[in-house]
């Protein structure tokens, strides 16, 4: 191999080694910018230039591409010169020998460059790219604090984490939260069998305008109108015993101490007209009393002498309900749903049973419509009957709680 070419290749690889190891290290650890002004002529080939802010992988990629470009350029120039000298061989005897040496040296240099490239890309194809993966900051996982199941009330919107405790029973007076409640969060038990529902009321003791809180949405923003709230454990069991009895006449008794007494009272009051319903939502005008005495029925048709010739059973609408008896574990909600109301309230007129005035939580023996009539002027036109848990809860926790339409 030509000694000049060999020395040139050695010098070139020495330059690469110095640049690969010394200059990147000094660049990486020094605070001062690089003093060497690197040429920008290789941008067309390497696709980049080097500056004081170039990172180490980009710098190495630049030097590798530049080195390969210079090496192949030297080989091509040397082959060209060797070819010219070979054609001039008839003129000078020394020219032929120099041409052979130069061509042999150029081919050797070409082999060294090709082998260098093949070795680098064979060991790891990524080496010819010189890319590195920057350390990414891994955010710490958010620790979810498991709240106790129940209903949480807040004066602020968004249910802030401020140490509120879970409520699991009716609140007939919200006290310092009265008219200030802005958000509510219902936390359901995902591992046990405790699912909660809640209704907000405008007035203490669970009446007035109300809003049924969606039990499946968690935190919800509400208007600050409530003064009381009912909270119940929902029972999704389809085998709920009993039902809710609505009576056309007052069904009063002071001797109610057990379920047998309730059964006797129900049978006694049925003769004046009744309607029995289980869980669900009903429009009162669609429900009619049964077994209503003839003298208590509503006249459907009159003759020319204004004598009633046809009678019908009255519906449960208006103030036709005089008593309610709840047999079993149910929450009964009377409410007025108008054309401008949203599906979950606030409804203009609501009243929930049982309440604090109901004997044995079995429902009112005598309905009092005076408050509704004197304040809102609106009688409820719907009822919602929701099964709630008694002393022995059995409902599966995975079931979703229905929304009152």
Image (spheres, rainbow, N blue to C red):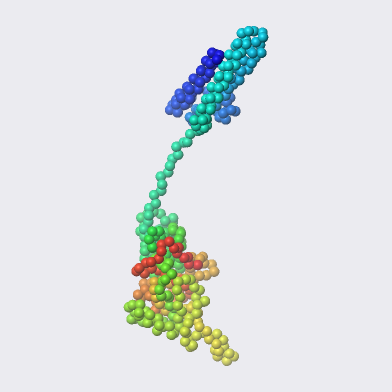
Q: In the shown orientation, is residue 71 left or right of residue 243?
A: right
- Outermost residue on the bottom side: it is 305
Q: Is residue 335 visible?
A: no
Can residue 25 be seen in this snapshot?
A: yes
Please name the residue shown 33% across and 77% down the image. Answer: 258
Q: Is residue 112 left or right of residue 250?
A: right
Q: Is residue 233 above or below residue 102?
A: below
Provide residue 394's location: percent of width, then percent of height: 38, 66
Q: Quadrant of the N terminus?
A: top right
Closer-to-camera residue (31/392): 392
Q: Please, is residue 211 above or below residue 84 in the view?
A: below
Residue 269 quadrant: bottom left
Residue 115 coordinates in the image, percent (x, y): 53, 25
Q: Is residue 161 above or below residue 248?
A: above
> Which residue appears at 63% of the width and 7% of the height?
93
Q: Residue at x 45, y 23 (%)?
A: 22
Quarter location, residue 393? bottom left
| Picture coordinates of residue 134, whole percent (x, y) | 46, 36
Which residue is more in the foreground, 79 or 179?
A: 79
x, y percent for residue 242 = 41, 75
Q: Nearer the viewer, residue 11 or 368?
A: 11
């Amino acid at each position: 191999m030509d000694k000049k070419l060999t020395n040139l290749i050695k010098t070139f690889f020495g330059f690469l080694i110095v640049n690969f190891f010394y200059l990147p290290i000094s660049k990486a650890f020094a605070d001062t910018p690089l003093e060497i002004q690197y040429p920008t002529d290789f941008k067309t080939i390497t696709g980049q230039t080097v500056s004081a802010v170039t990172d180490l992988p980009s710098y190495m990629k630049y030097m590798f591409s530049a080195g390969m470009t210079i090496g192949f350029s030297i080989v091509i120039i040397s082959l060209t010169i060797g070819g010219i000298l070979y054609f001039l061989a008839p003129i000078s005897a020394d020219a032929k020998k120099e041409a052979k040496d130069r061509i042999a040296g150029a081919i050797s240099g070409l082999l060294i460059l090709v082998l260098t490239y093949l070795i680098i890309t064979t060991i790891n194809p990524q080496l010819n790219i010189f890319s590195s993966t920057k350390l990414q900051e891994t955010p710490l996982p958010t620790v979810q604090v498991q709240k106790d199941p129940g209903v949480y009330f807040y004066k602020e919107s968004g249910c802030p984490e401020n140490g509120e405790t879970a409520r699991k029973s009716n609140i007939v007076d919200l006290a310092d939260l009265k008219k200030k409640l802005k958000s509510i969060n219902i936390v359901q038990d995902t591992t046990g069998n405790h699912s909660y529902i809640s209704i907000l009321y405008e007035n203490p003791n669970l009446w007035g305008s109300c809003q049924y809180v969606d039990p499946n949405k968690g935190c919800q923003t509400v208007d600050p109108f409530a003064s009381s709230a009912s909270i119940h454990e929902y029972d999704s069991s389809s085998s709920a015993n009993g039902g809710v009895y609505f009576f056309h006449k007052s069904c009063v008794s002071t001797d109610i101490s057990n379920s047998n007494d309730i059964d006797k009272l129900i049978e006694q009051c049925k003769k004046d007209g009744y309607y029995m319903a289980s869980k669900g939502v009903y429009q009162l005008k669609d429900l009619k009393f049964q077994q209503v005495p003839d003298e208590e029925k509503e006249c459907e048709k009159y003759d020319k002498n204004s004598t009633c010739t046809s009678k019908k059973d009255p519906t449960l609408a208006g103030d036709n309900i005089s008593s309610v008896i709840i047999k079993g574990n149910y929450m009964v909600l009377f409410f007025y749903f108008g054309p401008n109301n949203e599906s979950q309230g606030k409804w203009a007129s609501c009243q929930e049973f049982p309440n604090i005035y109901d004997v044995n939580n079995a429902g009112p023996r005598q309905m009092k419509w005076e408050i509704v009539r004197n304040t809102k002027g609106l009688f409820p036109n719907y009822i919602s009957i929701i099964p709630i848990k008694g002393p022995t809860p059995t409902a599966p926790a995975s079931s979703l709680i229905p929304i009152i339409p």
